[in-house]
Image (cartoon, grey):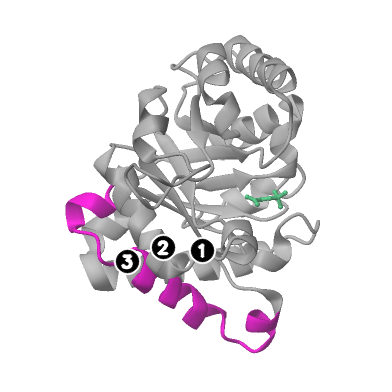
């Protein structure tokens, strides 16, 4: 079912004590809200080292922890890698895959992502799958083509049953960590395009039920306008997810629009 979602992505920030303190603060604020229907799914993407402890600091009723990556292989001689099974064994239900920083700095190709998504689904992890164009691609008016190709080559090998476990995050790379957010119209235009691309492949039912998040300098100032769009189901939040007040305010904004 299509859900309203606010997902944080802490990236490589916080030591374990700092992360537990931040998660505890977020959890307390989420618990203390009143008149809340809990319609919004709250997910917090933390470093691998934090999954267990942070997961134990969060009341499952209010939020869940996510990993930010997983290995492409199931197990074996892959020094330094962390498998989807290991993540799942920590009680974690989500993993972020294909983030533009992973694509750009760690050479994650569509083919690698196909394997990672497969490993994640084999271990019953829900996947937040990131797509998005770089500035030069948008300026060359290639953004739709780029995103379409990321969807086709990274996800569209999945069956109809499998794609139901995917949350798509549209994150224009030029908006990530730059303070330069996509306009509400740009976000809606791309989200509608993504939904129609999913519909063409899997049918309208599947497309109507998939959640599509916007990411890239989403903050308490611009979130309302972004979340009001019919095809924007929520946000993937980097910088603003490191401040408990801002993050919970974003959850409230999502809940109320
Ligand atoms: P940002 O990051 O909100 O700091 O731009 C978003 C993301 O990379 O997921």
CA–CA distance in space, label 1 to label 3: 22 Å
Disc 2 residue: CB within 8 Å of ligand 1? no
Mark 3 residue element: helix
- Relative to residue 205, is residue 12 drawn left or right? right
Magenta region, residue range: 136-164
Kindly check if marks 1 and 2 are in contact, taking CB atoms under 8 A apart as contact. Answer: yes
Overall secondary structure of the magenta section = helix
Residue displayed at 56% across by 66% down: 107
Residue 252: which quarter of the image? top right
Near-viewer residue (65 or 200): 65
> 171 or 14, which lies in front?
14
The residue identified by callout 2 is 112
Residue 126 % position (x, y): 36, 41
Residue highlighted by disc 1: 108
The part of the image, by quadrant, that contains residue 85 is: top left
Please name the residue shown 58% across and 12% down the image: 31
Q: Nearer the viewer, mark 3 or mark 2?
A: 2
Compute the Cα span from label 1 to label 2.
6 Å
Residue 58 to residue 109: above or below: above
- Residue 246 horizontal/vertical position (percent): 74, 32
Is residue 151 a member of the stretch shown in magenta? yes
Q: Which residue is mark 3?
A: 198
Mark with earlier residue (1, 3): 1
Quadrant for the N terminus in the image = top left
Which residue is rendered at x = 42% and y = 77% of the image?
149
């Amino acid at each position: 079912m299509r859900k309203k979602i606010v997902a944080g992505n802490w990236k490589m920030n916080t030591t374990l004590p700092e992360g537990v303190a931040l998660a505890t603060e977020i959890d307390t604020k989420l618990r203390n809200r009143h008149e809340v229907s809990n319609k919004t799914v709250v997910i917090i993407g933390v470093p691998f080292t934090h999954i267990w402890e942070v997961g134990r600091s969060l009341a499952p009723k209010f939020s869940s922890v996510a990993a930010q990556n997983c290995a492409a292989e199931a197990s074996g001689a892959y020094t330094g890698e962390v498998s989807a099974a290991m993540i799942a064994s920590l009680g974690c239900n989500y993993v972020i895959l294909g983030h533009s920083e992973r694509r750009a700095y760690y050479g994650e190709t569509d083919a690698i992502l196909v394997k990672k998504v497969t490993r994640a689904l084999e271990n019953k992890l829900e996947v937040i799958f990131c797509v998005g164009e770089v500035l030069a691609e948008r300026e060359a008016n290639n953004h739709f083509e780029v995103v379409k190709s990321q969807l086709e080559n990274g996800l569209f090998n999945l069956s109809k049953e499998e794609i139901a476990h995917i949350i798509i995050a549209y994150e224009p790379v030029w908006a990530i960590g730059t303070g330069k957010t996509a306009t509400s119209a740009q976000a809606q235009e791309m989200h509608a395009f993504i939904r129609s691309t999913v519909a063409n492949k899997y049918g309208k039912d599947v497309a109507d039920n998939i959640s599509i998040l916007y990411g890239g300098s989403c903050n308490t100032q611009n979130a309302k306008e972004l979340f009001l769009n019919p095809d924007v189901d929520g946000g993937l939040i980097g910088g603003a997810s490191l401040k408990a007040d801002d993050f919970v305010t974003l959850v409230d904004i999502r809940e109320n629009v």
